[in-house]
Amino acid sequence: MKKPSRKRWLVALTSLSILLVSCVVLSNTEVEKLNQDPNYWAFPGGNYWNWRYTELKQINKYNVRNLQAAWTFSTGVLRGHEGGPLVLPGSATGLPHDTLYIHSAFPNNTFAINLDTLEIVWEYVPVQDYDETVPVMC
C-alpha cells in the first residue's frame, strides 16, 4: 500500500482549516445581525465596543424618574456579580421565546430565563468544592 504523500496531508489540512474558519465567520454573522437590533443585548457590554448604551427611546429624561423594578431574580449568590446578562431572540437559540442568560459569581451557576413567562428554562450548577472559593481577581 502506498503511503499518503505530504502534499495530500497539506491539502487535507488546508481544506479542514478553511472549513473551520468559514464556520466561525457564519456564526459571527448571526451575532452581527443581533447587534443591529437594539432590542437584543447580544454582547456583555451591548456591542463589541462595550458601550453599555442602547438606542432605544422608551426611557428618556422626562420619564426616567418614574422607573420602578418590575421583576427581580436572585442567583442565590450574595457577593457581587461581575458579568452582565445576555438577551437573545428565539431565532438565535432555537427556543420558541426570547431568553435572558445570567451567570453568577462563585459557584458559577448559569440560568436561562424565558422572557415571556419569566420562568427558568434551564439551570447549570457545576460540581465544585465550596470550601475552595476562588479569590477575586479584580
Image (tube, helix red, strand yellow):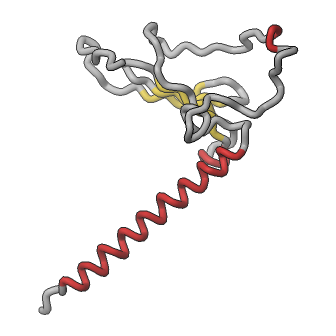
Asked where in the image residue 97 lies, by quadrant, the reply is top right
On the question of residue 49 being in view, the answer is: yes
Q: Position of residue 31 (x, y in %)?
A: 59, 48
Asked where in the image residue 136 lies, by quadrant, the reply is top left
Q: Residue at x 81, y 22 (%)?
A: 59
Along the line of sight, which residue is nearer the eye, 4 or 46?
46
**Left or right: residue 97 compared with residue 108:** right
**Left or right: residue 105 compared with residue 133:** right
Q: Position of residue 57 (x, y in %)?
A: 82, 29
Q: Residue at x 60, y 39 (%)?
A: 47
Q: Residue at x 78, y 11 (%)?
A: 67
Most extreme residue toward the bottom is: 1
Q: Position of residue 88 (x, y in %)?
A: 63, 39
Along the line of sight, which residue is nearer the eye, 96 or 82?
82
Q: Is residue 113 above or below residue 26?
A: above
**Left or right: residue 80 compared with residue 31:** left
Q: Is residue 36 above or below residue 130?
A: below
Asked where in the image residue 105 lies, by quadrant, the reply is top left
Q: Residue at x 78, y 32 (%)?
A: 56
On the question of residue 121 being in view, the answer is: no
Q: Position of residue 3 (x, y in %)?
A: 13, 87
Specify the quadrant that holds the C terminus.
Answer: top left
